[in-house]
Image: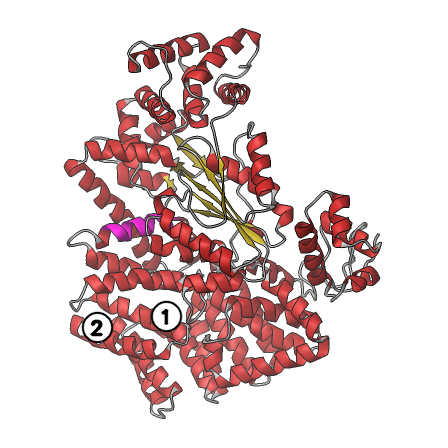
Amino acid sequence: MGFGFGQRRGGQLPAELTSFVGRVDELARVQAAFAYARLVTLVGPGGVGKSRTALRAAAGLGERFPDGVWLAELSALKDPELIPATLAAVLELPEQPGMAPLDAVVAHLQGRRLLIVLDTCEHLVDACAMLSDILLREAADVCVLATSRQPLDVPGEHCCPVPPLAPDDAVELFAQRAAAVVPGFRADDVHRERLLALVHRLDCIPLALELAAVRLRAVSIEELVARLDDRFQVLTGGRRTALSRHQTLRTAIDWSHELCTPAEQLLWARLSVFAGSFELVAAEQVCGDESLPVGEVLAQLIGLVDKSVVQRLGESGNRYRLLDTLREYGAERLAAVEGDAGAALRARHFAYYRDLGRRFEDGFLTAAQPELHRAVRAEMAGLRAALEYAYGTPGREREGLRLAARLWPHWRASGTLSEGAYWIEKGLERVAEDCSARAWGLLATGAFGVWTADLATAVERMALARECAERAGDDEVAQFAEAYAHGLAALCGDEAGLAALADVRRRMVESDNRLGLVVMSYEAGLLQAVLGDTDGALELCAQGLDLLEGVGERQVYGSTLMVQGLVRWLAGERAAGVASMCRGLEAASEVDEILVAAMCCHGLAWASAREGRQVRAAWLFGYAENARRLGGDPIGMLPSLLEQQEAARKSVREALGGKQFDRWHAVGARLTGRQVLEAVRADADVPGRAPGQRAPAGAVRRGGGDVLTRREREVAELVAQGLSNREIAERLVISKRTADAHVEHILAKLGVGSRTEIAGAAEVG
């Protein structure tokens, strides 16, 4: 359903890194609640296991939601205004020109059956409540599963309290975690009484149990229980009464904190400055100083991992994170001793992300570019925190604006122009004086206007950027802005615009403005093509490709190949145009460049239509149009491309018929960029199948249709037998709503318009 090349397919949930214990009743209640509620909120205190329970429940709900289960982790997000953009990124939904992110999300979700998991809402509860309310009202088949320490208080919300584990489950959880610490540990009869006393003292809170299990490295189970019992009696004045669950968890964390060495305690507090996950090098550069030498950070980090304070993430284990509750605890410790050391820590944190922005800019026209894109994507939570710090710290505003503007290619590649504009505009409000940072910010927002066909903004910002850059002495920005301004003028009918643009490009050559030169090769090339000079356009593209040949850069290279392919197509060089667009799509995949991928797929759809491969053309149109909708998109303001688009689309729809076209268009709209790339590489008429490939034994298929999943095969076979959706639901022990969704999904996959056509098309091996 999404579009990003590097995203998890179909909203796939993250793998569980440790075993899941208990929660049978809670999982059943959550899953049952969706039979009559569309918003279910898991409510409970920190450390009780809301997130794990939600993810396990969501995994079990997958069959009810043909369009996937999508996880939005909100713990690292601090600004409620960014929630819609964050959800759009999770859904792999690119920027929709002229639409606010929330409106784009709602438009995208209408007609889809999916589940959104909003994890950790309590610090953004009002914004999460507003978002959920809008989604429930505007997208009739979307459901939301939220986790929060308090209800969202949205009409129709069903709250499921998540209590501590049942005693037997708590013993099992502790025993499993203990076995990871002490090989061979078992919850046998010898240990069971002591374990029951232990879990009772810890109120069966999962996080408290996991922290306590680490202590078995140093003491026996008997001593562990005795020490814990002594500690709690001190806290309750010697009485064997229970602490509140909040106090119990706090005490368990205190206890875990005391288990740490002073250096580990210091690192724990300092790591709380990271908003999301982080790499070792970040921990070293940010947390290391004379009190904690950089060379010792790794050893202390290993100690925190061993004590279950810090988690290792990913298959390679090269990223780390603090659980939210432990991050909050570390932040309290940091605030208690902050002073000058805390200010220096936050400055180093900003410097690390400022330097990441510099590396991204400096390495943009090199082979390091794809990896730098991935680094920025992985560090987005930290970059947001760094920008907030800069804009809230006197004297740092310029650096913050420059950081936000440096990332302009990434905002485009990832389809998050609205977030990029948000951070840049925030900086422009704080930096009113002429300087290079302001000039870059104005230039970037002007370029955003070009890419979204907001011509008024583009023209205004390019003029302001040029004036600001000239006063600030930044020739690179001045040339960039002047080139864009002349190009926009030519597009609006100024005959002198192209000549003026060519003059700027000559000056770019003289001043060795390589970035401006290669970007303007494809931007000016596309402009000249739509104005009728295809030979000049192809010459510009060739110049740009020559400059980039062998460099290893991929975003501008892919953009230039895309333009070259479109221009060749317009010039009648059909085969050469398709070859260029396929190469452009390959390059775009390396940096997850959504705009280029969509434009290439438009061109490939035209080619497929001309070849009579109508099904292929329909799903290519579906992907491209869903990724970059035509209203206000660049193609929409370029007459010759728009004419080509409308003619090809009309011919495909007439050839297939409206129902078939809509079915295959919907299939394409649900594909990821990676799936599209694989289908194009295979020259497949149907995504997921090579030309001539037969369906596997036992599959239900129709000539050219998608192979169905096991459950969909079962449903299709029952449809072929003449059963109604209600009878299918009863036979398979699923809800009627789920049966309805499966039948609708099968219609789309097989490219048929009715239940009788399913019966006629089914080919059961």
Decide whether residue 525 is among the magenta residues.
no
Q: Is residue 596 above or below residue 707?
A: below
State the CA–CA distance, disc 1 to disc 2.
Answer: 18 Å
State the image coordinates of residue 753 (x, y, percent, origin top left). 74, 67
Of the numbered discs in the image, which one, if any, rests on residue 134? Answer: none
Which residue occupies 44% across, 72% down?
A: 546
Taking the image as shown, residue 723 lies to the left or right of residue 733, namely right
* Circles 1 and 2: CB atoms closer than 8 Å: no
Taking the image as shown, residue 656 lies to the left or right of residue 304, namely right
Decide whether residue 388 is among the magenta residues.
yes
Of the numbered discs in the image, which one, if any, rests on residue 448? Answer: 1
Q: Is residue 92 visible?
A: no
Which residue occupies 27% across, 66% down?
A: 441
- Stretch of the chain drawn in magenta: 379-389
Of the numbered discs in the image, which one, if any, rests on residue 469? Answer: 2
Q: Earlier in the sequence, mark 1 or mark 2?
A: 1
Label 1 is placed on what type of residue?
Phe
